[in-house]
Amino acid sequence: MDFINELISTNDTGSETSIYMVILAMLIATGLSLIITKIYQVTFTGERYSQAFVHTIIMMSVIVSVVMNVISGNSGVAFGLFAIFSLIRFRSAVTDAKDIAYIFFGLCVGMTSGLYHFDLAIILTIFASLIFYLLYKFQYGKGKDTQILKVTIPENLNHEHLLDDVFDMYTESYQLRQVETTNLGTMILYTYAIRSKNTTKDKELLDHVREKNANLKVSLTYLENLNE
């Protein structure tokens, strides 16, 4: 404890901090960001896992801890640095909305470590990591993803409410997105955006739609796959 207290001590004027303090902040930011990335790996449910993203969280946490030490108490430098950061753009799109939370998580840990609020940084890491894990473990808020349903219907069977009873039975919500003619105008292609009920099986939904459209082509696509 005496060693730690010596590390976090400042000089008599209080205007400069010990180099050991900066090193301690970087070490704590590194250790806590390793915990963050481990939780990220355990709770990852997306389609595109990236080792580079994991490394980025760690490096951002460490770098921000130093940046916070530089700009602490100097508003001019702070505005200058944030003006530079505003020019930075991510070269790759974030594929999972949860990744944004992990980026912000790592930044906050780096900021609190850089301001030498080590106790707060540790509490934040433990508490937020626990929340992330519990949300993943109990699948809180789980629901079916939005899907695109395309149904080909013969012109002689065409009417606006042909599939309403099927949608009422198998979906939470549905919306007609597009109507177009096909096969020289003898067929109508309907495109719906739907959210199936949790108990709905895709095959059951497709089978009941085929009963309505004379067993013509039906396709069901998840929106996530459209962005690949």
Image (cartoon, rainbow, N blue to C red):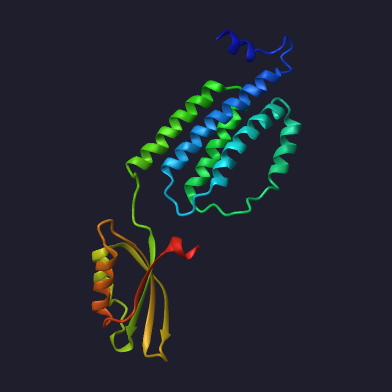
Q: Is 46 on the left-hand or right-hand side of 52?
A: left
Position of residue 49 measured from the top left corner of the image (x, y, whole percent):
49, 50
Rendering quarter of residue 205: bottom left
At x 37%, y 90%, the residue is 186
Provide residue 74's location: percent of width, then percent of height.
Answer: 73, 27
Residue 99 horizontal/vertical position (percent) = 50, 46
> Residue 142: x, y in percent?
34, 49
Q: Is 177 situated left or right of 162 in this image? A: right
Q: Which of 163 and 32 is in front in this view?
A: 32
In the rendered image, the vertical position of residue 17 relative to residue 93, given as above or below: above
Vertical order, 13 against 194 (above or below): above
Q: Residue at 75% x, 33% y: name it.
A: 77
Quadrant in which residue 190 is drawn? bottom left
Identify the residue shown where x is 65% and y is 23%: 23
- State which quarter of the image contains the N terminus: top right
Q: Which residue is more in the foreground, 91 or 112?
A: 91
